[in-house]
Amino acid sequence: MPQEVHEHQDLKPGHICVDCTLGGSGHALATLRSIVPDGLLIGIDQDLDAIHHARQILQPFEKNVRLFHSNFSDLPRILEAEKIFGVNSILLDLGFSLNQLKNGKRGFSFNKNEPLDMRMDIRNDLTAFDIINSFSESELTDIFFKFGEEKFSRKISRKIVETRKTAPIHTSFELAQMITKAIPAKFVYSQRIHPATRVFQALRIVVNKELEQLETFMKSVPSLLVKGGRLCIISFHSLEDRIVKQAIRKFENGCTCPKDLPICLCGFTPQMKSIFKKPLIPTKEEIDINPMARSSKLRVAQKV
Ligand SMILES: C[S@@+](CC[C@H](N)C(=O)[O-])C[C@H]1O[C@@H](n2cnc3c(N)ncnc32)[C@H](O)[C@@H]1O
């Protein structure tokens, strides 16, 4: 939803903006074009490849960009170190990039025979290989169910544990084939998505601590924006969207006192307001062009 994001960021020349998920830098470029000549873009990605790519793509705007190989949950520390005490816009376009899927060589795609890694930031220790080859059957079941909403999680984890008794499971392709074998055939062929989609999502979430990082980040949002500043977040599954929705609702409500108290004792006042009640979803035309966008949702909130 590049058009919708751009419209709702409400950018003006001179604005200070943050792109927390640079990826291929498409949104970053559009942002820069709206905030030059004297605006500033703070660009963050936890994948070093995305930072190298951004350095090239954003080169014409060199003076207006500062890049950080970091997690967006570190944004408060980054802004403090840069002596920036309020920004006009923050964008998060969650999940993984097309480049990570196609050229990452880290096992994000079930259609490729790549090492089971799935770390977006290779400085972290835990990989998908570690999880698949060393977590217990019940831990695997929990992960697939909780973070992939996979209804065959038990069957899949049993198959993994059985298979790894003979030899470790090394590649994304091996794992995808194993998942396909573990699921009853009639479900394999009746699903719209590849049978390994949910397990791969679950592994990626755990390897990259995606939900914890998002929760930590959301707590800091009102303190980072100037009054009227905008937060735009594109999420790709219900677990992410729930965290974003609940955090924004909490900031909108302000007071946390029990409903039956006659007066407010907590003193919290509303800090943000949603720009629209329901999230925006992509049009059919956008999904036809970019099938990866099919499950995306855009939420926008403004600091009051
Ligand atoms: C969907 S892509 C972003 C695409 C980008 N908006 C564009 O225009 O090309 C998501 C990017 O966010 C990065 N990412 C995901 N979670 C992150 C986090 N917690 N901190 C920093 N970067 C993150 C990924 O490494 C990936 O490059």
Image (cartoon, rainbow, N blue to C red):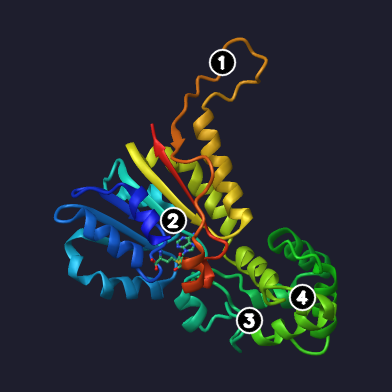
Q: Which mark is residue 190?
A: 4
Q: Nearer the viewer, residue 283 or 181?
A: 283
Residue count near mark 1 (Cα–Cα under 10 Å), binned few <14, some 14–19, many ≥20? few
**First of labels 3, 1 by sequence position:** 3
**The quadrant where residue 237 appears:** bottom right
Badge 2 is on which residue? 92
Q: Nearer the viewer, residue 4 or 88?
A: 4
Q: What is the C-alpha distance between the residues marked 2 and 1?
A: 34 Å
In the picture, which quadrant includes the C terminus?
top left
Q: Disc 3, disc 1: CB below 8 Å?
A: no
Q: Amino acid at mark 4?
A: Ser
Q: Which mark is residue 110?
A: 3
Would residue 184 be seen by someone viewing this image from the given angle? yes
Q: Amino acid at mark 3?
A: Phe
Q: Residue at x 31, y 50 (%)?
A: 81
119 displayed left or right of 89: right
Judging from the image, what secondary structure is the residue with disc 1 in? loop
188 displayed left or right of 267: right
Badge 1 is on which residue? 265
